[in-house]
Amino acid sequence: MIERNGLKIASELYRFVEEEALPGSEVSSDAFWAGFSQIINELGPRNRELLHNREQLQERIDQWHQQNTWTGNRQKYESFLKEIGYWEQKGESFKISTTNVDDEVAILAGPQLVVPVNNARYAINAANARWGSLYDALYGTDAIGEQNGAERGAAYNPVRGQKVVEFARNFLDQIAPLVKGSHTLTTEYRMEQDKLVIVQGTEKTVLQDPSKCIGFTGDKASPTAILLQNNGLHVEIQVDRHHSIGKTDAAGVKDLLIESALTTIMDCEDSVTAVDAEDKVLVYQNWLGLMNGTLTATFKKGQRDVTRKLNADRMYHTISGKELIIRGRSLLLIRNVGHLMTSNMILDQQNHEVPEGIIDTVITSLLAKHDLLRKGNLHNSEKGSVYIVKPKMHGSAEVAFANELFNRVEDLLGLVRYTLKIGVMDEERRTSLNLENCIRQVKERIVFINTGFLDRTGDEIHTSMYAGPVIRKNEMKHSTWLQSYEKSNVDTGLTCGLPGRGQIGKGMWAMPDRMKDMLEQKMGHLLAGGNTAWVPSPTAATLHALHYHQLSVARVHEKLIHEIRDRSTDILTLPLAEDGWSPSEIQQELDNNAQGLLGYVVRWVEHGIGCSKVPDIHDVGLMEDRATLRISSQHMANWLHHGVCTEDQIMETLKRMAKVVDEQNSEDPAYKSMSSDFEQSIAFQAACELIFNGHNQPSGYTEPILHRRRREFKCKNKNKMMEEFN
């Protein structure tokens, strides 16, 4: 440990800050560590007070449920929540006043990726997912059916290829219809007399709305690309008659390039396994590489090495002959950790571990300053802002604390007030009930709210742990509280004036292999008022982008603003089971929870993978992160507490499902079987602890157990390697 200004700092972190983060930041080492120390010593105790208040409120709610039945006592329950300060009194109405927000967040509507920033390859892929091939997205997924000879295979299938082309041309007809005919009949695209002309054999036609064509590349008479704009989003028609696809196309079109992931959240939290200074420095190094444009990733693809780097911006000519530059990369946000966890990377003057959320805010903001100072060739924010998503805050006092932290960090780094923008994730019940008050605390810097089924359900179960057994997990999606929570989030965002200044987000499509279903269902997020929604891959972003061409979210908001109402009582409708279940239904639910939990835990604890496609009990790949564990462990802990199942039954289920997970991972040479020795399997023991001690975990969070078990596994492996070496 390095001692500096009363702090003890892990040597890895200290070297990174001194050698990589501070140089070029225009912040001196002395000023940085002095200011950082002051922030820690003054705000650290307040962080602990907020967590203590969480615990006290939960204890009082637990006691109420132990002494009262919720059914028949709803009014008494609601009065109690107000009395203890859990449900806050609303203030006067207001509108947010956030300024200097990039268009991708403030104005445009489109898909959003969330990616673990500690994986450089994933991070670069996500940043570059601003643009994606529609032909590839359709051909390589089930978005195009395999009937009538259109099967996917190792070799190119021209029948399938033709279906892709037909889909793409029909899409062009939807977003850029012609005065006469269809894009399916086009034999040539060219620029004539300052407009796009579409040739169809011996006939010529134009777009119904000529202003939708905003640029091109190549010669006017024979352009290599045509740039269209619809609902603020871009589509590039790529023309190359010598390309293997283009030469088979009447118009020489080889692909449609779709503007896809407008924004990407680079995640330090739920999708990341960062449990010590070694892990965290990698997180910070990758974020710095994204901010100064230098991040690269080299990996094997077949027999050759491939190096990925960040894409440059895209250059076009306008129809009037001017140069047009369109961003080549997704606008990047950074998700810091919440208020709960502390880190031994830094110890304060009393040798307390420092809240990791404070460390994250200071370091990630310092690194983002490299972008603000334009230190690299590629820039993130054109408006000079840093976008920090803050998860798992409970109520307005915790949001106010985050705002004070942001103020202090801006002062430390010499940033103009409100340079640091905040995204408030609405994933805890105390925040859902008080969302307007939460937004009020950050009304000058907020740019993002969203909903999240998994974390929000985990908190719902934990908050009402003693009220009774909850309904089955799949039934939660149709429950009164969840439907009201989703609608209330949009209502509040509209009431507080987020459209035009920030995003109202919706949750993840978790099945990356089911793109046909996503195309059919995820339009629902737009209809619900989401101007962004999470997708699991760049391919999914390209396909989900089609929805934002087909529907204007701004028009949806115009309709929804007339349907706003107070949904608080509905949000407080506890998801308690009214009837029991058969033994087979109980076992089915336990099997499903246990298998998903084990499949994720084993990768987190023993492989250091925080986000991956994990097969469920039916071998359907689901994109999972730590929120998965919260809902599954809390659900099983609730049923165990209320006698729906027994401890022996859960243990038998875990052991049986461990064998299923072992089999699903049997082709991974690095995988270690859980079922060969349950007692020695750290992953299996972590899973047991998450369930059997689930009711005692703060807000039902999994981080304390996962972090401790991951460090245990790393230590065990390190000791084993040293023994083998000696």
Image: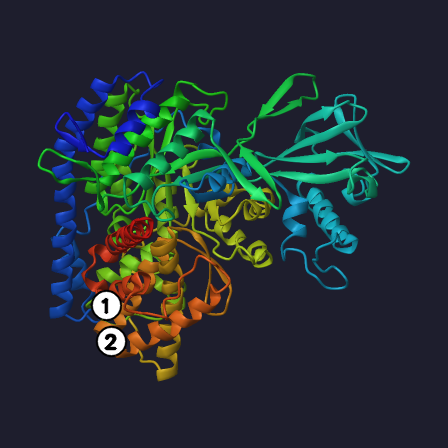
Instruction: Name which residue lies at 37% across and 46% down.
Output: 272
Q: Quadrant of the N terminus?
A: top left
Q: Considering depth in this image, is 441 or 393 the residue closer to the camera?
A: 393
Q: Which residue is mark 1?
A: 692
Q: Residue furthest front?
A: 726
Q: Give the vertical position of 442 relative to 593 (above or below).
A: above
Q: Is residue 300 visible to the viewer in this orientation of the structure?
A: yes
Q: Secondary structure at mark 2?
A: helix
Front residue of this view, candidates 723 and 304: 723
Q: Residue furthest right?
A: 202
Colour option used? rainbow
Residue 166 position within the rendered picture, expressed as x and y whole percent measured from the top left: 75, 50
Q: CA distance from mark 1 to mark 2?
A: 8 Å
Of callouts 1 and 2, the N-terminal one: 2
Q: Residues within 10 Å of mark 1 (few under 14, many from 20)?
A: some
Q: Who's the residue at 79% across and 39% down the image? A: 246
Q: Are marks 1 and 2 in contact (CB under 8 Å)?
A: yes
Q: Is residue 646 visible?
A: no
Question: In the rendered structure, which amino acid carries the disc numbered 2?
Answer: Glu
Disc 2: which residue? 647
Q: Secondary structure at mark 1?
A: helix
- Which residue is rendered at x = 47% and y = 43% of the image? 113
Q: Neighbour class for label 2 at 10 Å: few (<14), some, many (≥20)?
A: some
In percent of width and height, residue 452 lies at 37, 52
Q: Is residue 519 above or below residue 228?
A: below
The image position of residue 556, as x and y in percent, is 50, 45
Give, as a three-letter code, the residue at label 1.
Answer: Phe
Relative to the observer, which residue lies in front, 720 or 457? 720
Where residue 230 sits, quadrant-wise, is: top right
